[in-house]
Image: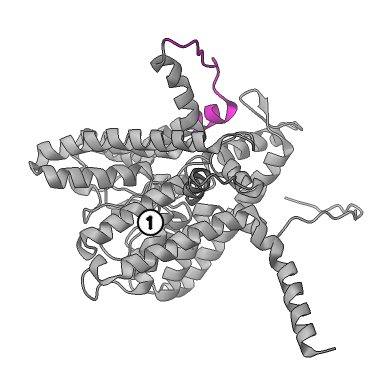
């Protein structure tokens, strides 16, 4: 046989070996986000996107990843280094990453008259909402877009009017309101002000608008769509459309966990303390509430995080690790995963075989996925902390800075104690990878790399003592 035959045979064997990875629904999501990140990095690297000589390609890649993954960590100042064109590119990347790359892909397919494959629909089903595979995605996505545009427009008007009263500059107020409205709803945390929102902490109207946008963006598309369906009968009074009396179990868990985490975070930060700049009770309560809301995913700050007590930093780290809700712009392990973990621990301690949340049993497959998700998240962050402790040896960098930076990147939060700009090349590459993993989800990446295999062999049981 000729050598060409063996080369062709080896080629086909290689294709067949990696075909399941390329056809998997997880690959569609991962490749979509990756493509947008690289395109965004090229645009941000262009000379007219930044001040001359200020941005290397690594910094452009870092900013693009932070934008698409709606994180908010920055290695160069957005307000002074990037031009208006560069800031608009960042804003478009934030909106694309916030809505999800698969959203635009699905809309494009629908507008071209092509049907989505079942694998693509599976990704959308897991990423955004709990609908049947055969649902009309175009109508659902248009509802998502309409809801997003409506919420961002209302937020923009409120912030814009408050800024205009404050500055008197209508053009700059509108631009700033547009940027921060989209950044807040997408939970990105990017700001065109050098110190984020520190200079605006005395304006309670702007802070309230930002917090409501963050909360709305962190609830998830499934909850927003359910809220939309409940509002439609109110608007269409002439139609006989009576909404269900009860929220879905998912929505109820999301609402309760969101409220509980905000209250616990606010009280905890008030108890452990803020910085010395907050002297009055109004400033202290406002600062604690804002940091509790933004800590789980958004990344805006009205206080200097580097000056917070270590106990407050630890509480914020816990909130960042939990993150927002599924199907939203948020990262972390998600509020529902934390709720399931608490319910499972309570059931196991009581000796119960069933795990219940709000008088509903949690299916075993969800318990399994939840356990794997939390373990993968913990393993990834522990490894990342060790790596950053080894690579980041700049003067003044403590262990709390490294832990805070790692969890902030994984939770796609964007808060920092000041380590981001000091990161080494290896540290920046690791944070880029961590932001990406935090956005697409560690379980998604693991299921893509390690395909499911059904093993028919059963091994004998072994008894092992535990603590």
Going by the image, does 270 lie left or right of 332? Answer: left
Residue holding disc 1:
67
**Does residue 251 sit above or below 390 in this rendering?**
above
**Does residue 361 sit above or below 179 in this rendering?**
above
Residue 220 appearing in the image: no
User: Residue 72: percent from the left, percent from the top?
Assistant: 36, 55
Going by the image, does 395 lie left or right of 437? Answer: left
Q: Nearer the viewer, residue 276 or 88?
A: 88
Residue 247: quarter of image: top right
Going by the image, does 363 lie left or right of 436? Answer: right
Is 251 included in the stretch rendered in magenta? yes
Magenta residues span 238-257
Q: Residue at x 89, y 52 (%)?
A: 461
Of helix, strand and loop, which one carries label 1? helix
User: Residue 208: percent from the left, percent from the top?
Assistant: 27, 34
Q: Nearer the viewer, residue 462 or 184?
A: 184
Q: Residue at x 22, y 37 (%)?
A: 159
User: Residue 204: percent from the left, percent from the top?
Assistant: 22, 34
Q: Within 10 Å of the Cα at label 1, are there few (<14), some (14-19), or many (20+) other Cα atoms?
A: many
Residue 199 appearing in the image: yes
Q: Nearer the viewer, residue 72 or 129?
A: 129
Going by the image, does 451 lie left or right of 76? Answer: right
Q: Residue at x 32, y 38 (%)?
A: 152
Identity of the residue furthest to the bottom in this view: 2
């Amino acid at each position: 046989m000729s050598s060409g035959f063996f080369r062709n045979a080896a080629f086909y064997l290689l294709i067949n070996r990696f075909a399941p990875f390329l056809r998997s629904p997880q690959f569609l999501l991962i490749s979509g986000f990756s493509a947008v990140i690289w395109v965004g990095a090229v645009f941000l690297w262009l000379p007219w996107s930044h001040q001359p000589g200020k941005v290397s390609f690594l910094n452009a890649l870092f900013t693009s990843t932070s934008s698409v993954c709606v994180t908010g960590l920055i290695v160069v100042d957005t307000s002074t280094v990037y031009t208006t064109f560069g800031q608009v590119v960042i804003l478009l990347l934030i909106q694309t990453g916030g809505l999800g790359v698969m959203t635009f892909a699905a809309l494009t397919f629908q507008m071209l008259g092509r049907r989505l494959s079942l694998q693509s629909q599976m990704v959308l089903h897991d990423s955004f909402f709990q609908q049947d595979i055969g649902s009309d995605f175009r109508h659902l996505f248009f509802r998502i877009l309409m809801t997003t545009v409506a919420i961002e427009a209302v937020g923009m008007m409120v912030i814009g009017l408050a800024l205009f009263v404050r500055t008197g500059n209508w053009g700059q107020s509108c631009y700033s309101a547009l940027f921060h409205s989209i950044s807040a709803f997408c939970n990105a945390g990017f700001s065109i002000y050098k110190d984020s929102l520190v200079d605006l902490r005395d304006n309670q109207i702007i802070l309230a608008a930002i917090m409501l946008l963050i909360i709305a963006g962190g609830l998830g598309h499934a909850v927003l769509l359910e809220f939309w369906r409940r509002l439609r009968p109110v608007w269409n009074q002439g139609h006989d459309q009576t909404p269900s009396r009860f929220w879905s179990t998912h929505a109820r868990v999301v609402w309760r966990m969101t409220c509980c985490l905000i209250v616990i975070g606010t009280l905890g930060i008030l108890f452990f303390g803020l910085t010395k700049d907050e002297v009055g009770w109004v400033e202290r309560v406002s600062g604690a509430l804002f940091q509790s809301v933004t800590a789980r995913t958004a990344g805006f700050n009205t206080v200097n995080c580097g000056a917070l007590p270590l106990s407050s930093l630890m509480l914020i780290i816990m909130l960042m690790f939990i993150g927002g809700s599924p199907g939203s712009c948020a990262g972390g392990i998600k509020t529902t995963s934390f709720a399931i973990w608490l319910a499972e621990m309570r059931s196991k301690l009581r000796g119960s075989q069933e795990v219940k949340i709000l008088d509903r049993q949690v299916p075993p497959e969800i318990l399994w996925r939840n356990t794997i998700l939390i373990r993968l998240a913990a393993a990834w962050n522990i490894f990342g902390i060790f790596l950053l402790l080894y690579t980041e040896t700049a003067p003044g960098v403590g262990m709390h800075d490294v832990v805070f930076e790692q969890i902030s990147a994984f939770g796609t939060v964007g808060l920092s104690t000041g380590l981001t700009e000091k990161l080494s090349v290896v540290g920046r590459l690791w944070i880029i990878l961590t932001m990406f993993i935090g956005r697409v989800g560690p379980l998604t990446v693991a299921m893509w790399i390690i395909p499911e295999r059904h093993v028919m062999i059963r091994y004998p049981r072994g008894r092992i003592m535990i603590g």
